[in-house]
Image: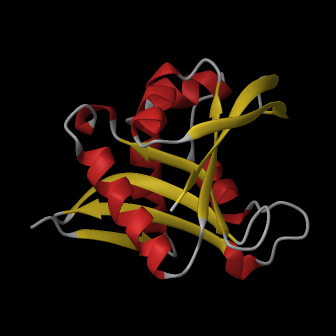
Amino acid sequence: MDMIKLISVNNDELKNEALNVYLENNYYFSKISDNPLSISNVEEDIEVIPNGVQKNQKNYRLISFNDEILGVVDFLTDYPEKDIILIGFFIIKNDKQKQGLGTRIFRYLEKSFKNKKFLKIRIGVLVDNEIGLSFWKKQNFKEIERKFLKFEKSEKEVIVMEKEI
């Protein structure tokens, strides 16, 4: 049976593990930044929260699959409203994609969210992130709106998708 763990990133060694995941997912990061990735990107991602959100709603975790760090997930609880989880990002190393691991990890997350009585999961996917869009559609997410969000490079169109759980 698969052993999936979410690991809180609370020291430099774990921040470096997260940076390693970022560096091994150049497809996603090339969409939002021209600058080389560094530990400061990880630190910013760990800390950044929308206005009005409490620190205890923020969850930035390494994803361990059978004792190997494969990815990072960042999510907010009860955001943008009660009973909704917003996944800020869910990334898996490039060489671990297309093997069903992302789906297995997402099902684990989905089950854990459902067990905690959340009703919906919401995500935002860059319009030009074909890999991400394909993945989330396979997980039965449906488009609910489109909006423009500011990234490092520029404003980008994002498809907001949602799934009831």
Q: How is the image coloured?
A: secondary structure
Most extreme residue toward the left, as rendered?
1
Say how many tags the image has: 0
At 37% across and 35% down in the image, what residue appears? 24
Quadrant assignment, res 52: bottom right
Residue 71 placement (x, y as % from top left): 38, 51
Q: Is residue 162 left or right of residue 78?
A: left
Q: Is residue 162 above or below residue 164?
A: above
At 82% across and 71% down in the image, what residue appears? 53
Q: Quadrant of the N terminus?
A: bottom left
Quadrant assignment, res 36: top right
Q: Is residue 119 left or right of residue 135?
A: right
Residue 126 placement (x, y as % from top left): 64, 28
Most extreme residue toward the front, as rendered?
164
At 59% across and 70% down in the image, what residue appears? 59
Work out whether residue 158 or residue 82 is closer to the camera in this orientation and state it.
82
Most extreme residue toward the right, as rendered?
51
Q: Is residue 115 above or below residue 111?
A: below
Residue 70 placement (x, y as % from top left): 30, 51
Q: Is residue 39 above or below residue 62?
A: above
At 47% across and 33% down in the image, what residue appears? 137
Work out whether residue 127 or residue 38 is closer to the camera in this orientation and state it.
127
Residue 85 placement (x, y as % from top left): 63, 64
Q: Is residue 38 left or right of residue 70?
A: right
Q: Is residue 81 above or below residue 130?
A: below
Q: Is residue 154 left or right of residue 107?
A: right
